[in-house]
Every structure is written in structure tokens, then in C-alpha cells.
Image (cartoon, grey):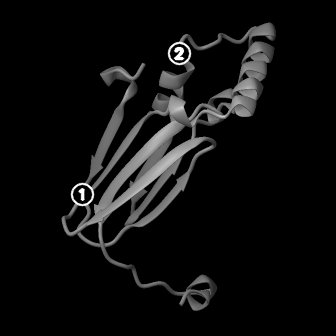
Amino acid sequence: MTTPDTIRRLSYDAEGPVDIAVHIGAGSVELHLREEPGVSVELRPAPQEANPWAEGVASLMAWVGTAMGEQRPADPTADAVAQARVDFGGGSLTVRSAKGGHLRAVPVAVVVHAPAGRRPRSGPAARRRP
């Protein structure tokens, strides 16, 4: 069950287009571009996106960790949301899954609202884009 404690919301000041990169092990991503300044990110558990195979691997990894003396989190979905990394700076937003192996498999929904537009690019990657 998703409670307000398991939803994480972050906001950043941004006037123009933003480079956005989202790297999650499991879950969903929504990107909403708008004509307003500012960037907002919401992370929440996404149990409906669960993959039975990934859940099995995550459970096995958690069991191995417990057998080796690690404390098993009481609520892995809340930990996956809390430990996801969100970085913003220099006109770039990056969202990554939690580092813990068993937490990467916990599905997280990421919703990003950012200003519309396109940043000028340079370098080899820019030449390949239409």
C-alpha cells in the first residue's frame, strides 16, 4: 500500500530545457514537458509493475544478505523509494534506482515535470541526432 511516507517529491528551479536521464531497474517513467519553469520529481512504489522473476531474485538476494548477518529492511518498497538517487545541477536531472542489489528489482514509478524545449548539443552524439 502506498502511503504519504512512501512517496518522495522533489522540486528544483530551472528556467529552460533540462537534460533528463532516468535509470531504474524496474518500474515506470512518466515525463511531462510543460511551458512553465521548474523541475519536479515524484517517486513512489509501483507494485503493479512487478516482474515475478525479478521479485524472486530480489527475495533471494535479501535472504542471502540476511544469512550473512545484514539487516533485512522492514519495507523494501519504502527503502527503494528513499534510497533512489536524484541529482540536479547544471541543467541536468538524473534519477537512478537504489544501489542495493535487492532494491534495484523493487519497482518504482518516476514522474518528472520539466520545462519544454531542446538544449543545444555539441560533440559526436549531437551529430547523430536528426
Q: Is residue 22 above or below residue 116?
A: above
**Residue that protrudes farthest toward the left in the picture:** 36
Q: Helix, strand, or loop for circle 2?
A: loop
In the image: residue 2, left or right of residue 113:
right
Q: Is residue 62 above or below residue 34?
A: above
**Residue, disc 2:** 75
Q: Residues within 10 Å of mark 1 (few under 14, many from 20)?
A: few
Disc sitting over residue 39 in the figure:
none
For discs 1 and 2, the disc positioned in front in the rendered view: 2
Residue 97 vs residue 53, the one in the foreground: 53
Check disc 2 and give the amino acid type: Asp
Residue found 37% across the figure and 53% down from its top: 112
**Residue, disc 1:** 13
Residue 15 vs residue 4, the one in the foreground: 4
In the image: residue 11, left or right of residue 29:
left
Residue 116 % position (x, y):
30, 71
Q: Helix, strand, or loop for circle 1?
A: loop
Residue 1 % position (x, y):
42, 19
